[in-house]
Image: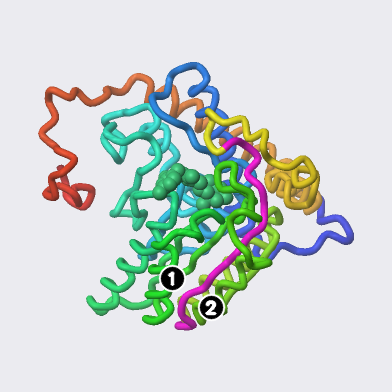
């Protein structure tokens, strides 16, 4: 293996950098496939992707440990995979397989697995911040120590009531909550200037009396370093941490949306860089080009095998269902052996 080129800085930590890169690659590969399946009419419901946001998302996943709580949103395939969610869980949920974590009952994007510490998403708009704060309160009341909670939201979510309520509660209670805001410039088609009046969302941290960290969300090394530091601060008892990454989503809001309203100048700016391309360039510059090729091939094989396997799996038969949406018994069935 050739050594790193002169002028290329050493990564924050090689093992974590590799985990980050591989999760980003696996996320992009499975999401590209899901987009194709959507266009081929194979997916019922919407498909929402995290293209361009993989570095920030995966940085959260790799910074967490077993026992931590993770509340990912619709753009967090990379974070989920980095935290250890099996890739086949995503394919099973999108294709409605009965063998998936949601048993084929979910409309694609709310999957979670409480046994792994992954909260099923209620809403993309801030609700998970309050839910994660609640889980951290419960852990504290039970006397469980040493774990953090991390949730991801968008710029649009920061305008909602539950974002304020959750963050304020976390601040007052000094909960070990890390909130990663992917400020991707738009909430659906609403641009930043119609979303908030402050210069930078990071200013919000001051208002809540908590620590804030701003970063270029297109730079994988920076994501790893800054999100890792925020998680460590929370774990060490420094209270809630607000991380604001600036980037763009390099796709529509969902696959039904072409995203043509995104400003051309923004697309061409640093904020519009593809973090996966940056990651590949850095990996090659560090003399690990062959590794990159191998990771990409492995990701492709894993996705192809998952899709082939899940395509042959059964979907739920509504006539056999005993579960009801309004029933509270069974809400934690993932924790029980069925
Ligand atoms: C109360 C409510 N209004 C509207 C929606 C539809 N909706 C879902 S996500 C979204 C935009 C979210 O924007 P942002 O928080 O910036 O996240 P991004 O999609 O950019 O990742 C909208 C309008 C919703 N789910 N709930
Ligand atoms: Mg947004």
Q: Quadrant of residue 11?
A: bottom right
Q: Which residue is mark 1?
A: 167
Q: Position of residue 324 (x, y in %)?
A: 14, 38
- The crowding category of the residue bearing disc 1, from other C-alpha atoms within 10 Å (few below 14, some 14 to 19, many at least 20), is many
The residue sitting at 34% across, 19% down in the picture is: 312
Image location (x, y in percent) of residue 237: 45, 83
Q: Identify the residue shown where x is 88% and y is 61%.
A: 7
- Mark 2 and mark 1 lie on one chain; the one further toward the N terminus is 1
| Type of secondary structure dominating the magenta stretch | loop
As rendered, which of 32 and 82 lies closer to the eye?
A: 32
Instruction: Establish if 77 lies above or below 130.
Output: above
Count of all numbered marks drawn on residues in the image? 2
Decide which of 150, 21 is in the foreground and name it.
Answer: 150
Segment tinted magenta in the rendering: 237-252
Q: Secondary structure at mark 2?
A: helix
**Image quarter (top left, top right, bottom left or bottom right) of the C terminus:** top left
Q: Is residue 76 visible?
A: no
Q: Nearer the viewer, residue 45 or 263?
A: 263
Asked if residue 234 lies left or right of residue 15, the reply is left
The residue tagged 2 is 207
Ligand 1: does it lie within 8 Å of the C-beta at label 2? no
Dot label at residue 152: none
Q: Is residue 265 above or below residue 299?
A: below
Residue, far right: 6
Residue 45 drawn in magenta:
no
């Amino acid at each position: 293996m050739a050594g790193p080129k002169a002028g290329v800085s050493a990564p924050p930590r090689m093992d974590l950098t590799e985990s980050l890169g591989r999760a980003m690659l696996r996320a992009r590969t499975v999401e590209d496939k899901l987009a194709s399946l959507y266009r081929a009419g194979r997916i019922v419901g919407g498909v929402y992707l995290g293209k361009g946001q993989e570095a920030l998302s995966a940085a959260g996943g790799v910074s967490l440990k077993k026992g931590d709580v993770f509340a990912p949103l619709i753009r967090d395939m990379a974070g989920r995979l980095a935290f250890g969610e099996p890739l086949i869980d995503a394919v099973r949920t999108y294709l409605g397989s009965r063998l998936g974590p949601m048993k084929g009952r979910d409309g694609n994007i709310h999957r979670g697995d409480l046994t792994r510490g992954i909260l099923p998403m209620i809403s993309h708009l801030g609700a998970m911040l309050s839910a994660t704060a609640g889980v951290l309160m419960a852990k504290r009341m039970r006397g469980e120590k040493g774990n953090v909670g991390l949730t991801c939201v968008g710029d649009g979510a920061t305008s909602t009531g539950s974002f304020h309520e959750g963050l304020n509660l976390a601040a007052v209670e000094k909960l070990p909550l890390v909130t990663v805001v992917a400020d991707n410039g738009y909430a659906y088609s609403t641009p930043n200037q119609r979303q908030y009046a402050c210069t930078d969302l990071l200013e919000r941290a001051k208002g809540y009396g908590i620590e804030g960290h701003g970063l270029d969300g297109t730079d994988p090394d920076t994501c790893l370093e800054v999100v890792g530091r925020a998680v460590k601060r929370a774990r060490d008892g420094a209270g809630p941490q607000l991380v604001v990454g600036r980037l763009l989503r390099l796709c529509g809001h969902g696959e039904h949306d072409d995203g043509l309203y995104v400003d051309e100048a923004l697309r061409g700016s640093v904020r519009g860089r593809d973090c996966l391309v940056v990651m590949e360039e850095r990996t090659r510059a560090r003399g690990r080009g062959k590794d990159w090729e191998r990771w990409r091939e492995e990701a492709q094989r894993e996705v192809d095998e998952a899709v082939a396997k899940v395509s042959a799996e059964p979907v739920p038969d509504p006539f056999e269902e005993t579960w009801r949406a309004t029933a509270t018994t069974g809400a934690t069935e993932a924790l029980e052996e069925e």
